[in-house]
Image: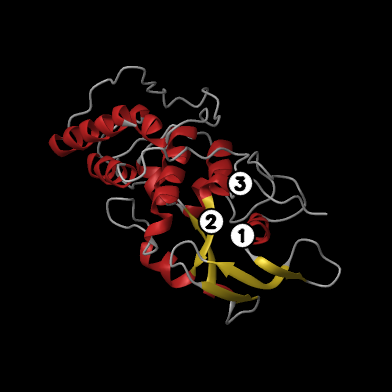
């Protein structure tokens, strides 16, 4: 633990000065489209944080939610759970809600349930409908516009659509909290529920590592500050509890 705490302190110092050396054992993946997108091996999130490249944001020029990342909640992607005959939004609701009721004759369309909201720590009742569905939204842990400005421009269209629909990248959350977050990174926004912050930033690191995205100096400082309170926090993987989908039956 002492070694990882020291590493976290070093990260904070480097981030404060805007430095970004090549750390021992780091793997600065090329941004080329030919490199495969695979989840990083399991281990402490602090160790994974050390491998992420650090630099400023690229311009948002060219960002288009649908044009660059594909139709929302598409089942036709290479993301885990793709082509399972259930759209991504319902996949995540099925995974994250409790006491679920489905539309008659469906094992995909969720009509009601209860969300133990990770962002606020409250239980939120969900009822499908034009005036009620937005009480529970599905958040991209790494906002897509942030991803676009930190390396996703170099991904292929297929890889960006996988990122958009990857269960590792998605979590059901309070609608107002998700709206408040908008496209902020960890330097600008963290969940009000402090008990979830270590899990939240570890998830962001896992997504950025998997899709070869970089972080800004301020973001690195914020991520290290949170993980310094939980140095044994593990990096989530595609098959981790809370990430892997429940298979529709």
Q: Quadrant of residue 131?
A: bottom right
In front: label 2 or label 3 = 3
Q: Name the residue nearer the viewer: 82 or 123.
A: 123
Q: CA distance from mark 2 to mark 3?
A: 12 Å
Residue 70, horizontal then vertical, whole percent: 57, 49
Give yes or no for contact between labels 2 and 1 (Cβ–Cβ under 8 Å). Answer: yes
The residue drawn where x is 23% and y is 39% is: 217
The residue tagged 2 is: 171
Residue 148, horizontal then vertical, whole percent: 40, 44
Within 10 Å of disc 2 (Cα), the crowding (few <14, some 14-19, many 20+) is many
Q: Name the residue nearer the viewer: 4 or 60.
A: 4
Residue 221, horizontal then vertical, whole percent: 24, 42
- In the picture, the quarter occupied by the N terminus is top left
* Residue found at the far left of this picture: 17
The residue tagged 1 is: 96
Q: Which mark is residue 110?
A: none
In front: label 3 or label 1 = 3
The residue tagged 3 is: 241
Q: Name the residue nearer the viewer: 144 or 12.
A: 12
* Residue found at the far front of this picture: 2
Element type at mark 3: loop
* Residue found at the far bottom of this picture: 131
Q: Earlier in the sequence, mark 2 or mark 3?
A: 2
Q: Is residue 168 left or right of residue 201?
A: right
Q: Earlier in the sequence, mark 2 or mark 1?
A: 1
Within 10 Å of disc 3 (Cα), the crowding (few <14, some 14-19, many 20+) is few
């Amino acid at each position: 633990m002492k070694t990882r705490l020291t590493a976290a302190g070093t990260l904070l110092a480097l981030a404060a000065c805007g430095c970004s050396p090549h750390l021992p054992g780091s793997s600065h993946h090329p941004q080329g489209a030919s490199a495969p997108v695979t989840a990083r091996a399991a281990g402490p999130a602090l160790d994974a944080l050390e491998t992420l490249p650090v630099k400023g944001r690229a311009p948002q020029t060219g960002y288009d939610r649908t044009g660059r990342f594909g139709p929302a909640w598409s089942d036709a992607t290479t993301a885990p759970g793709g082509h399972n005959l259930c759209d991504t939004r319902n996949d995540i609701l099925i995974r994250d809600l409790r006491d679920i009721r489905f539309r008659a004759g469906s094992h995909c369309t969720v009509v009601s349930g209860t969300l133990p909201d990770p962002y606020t720590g409250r239980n939120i009742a969900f009822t499908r409908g034009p005036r009620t569905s937005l009480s529970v939204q599905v958040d991209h842990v790494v906002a897509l516009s942030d991803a676009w400005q930190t390396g996703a421009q170099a991904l292929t269209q297929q890889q960006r659509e996988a990122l958009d629909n990857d269960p590792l990248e998605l979590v059901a959350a309070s609608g107002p909290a998700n709206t408040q977050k908008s496209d902020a990174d960890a330097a600008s926004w963290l969940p009000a529920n402090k008990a979830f912050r270590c899990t939240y930033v570890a998830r962001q690191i896992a997504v950025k590592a998997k899709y070869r995205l970089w972080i800004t100096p301020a973001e690195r400082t914020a991520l290290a500050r949170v993980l310094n309170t939980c140095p044994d926090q593990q990096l989530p993987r595609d098959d981790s509890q809370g990430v892997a989908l429940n298979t529709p039956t």
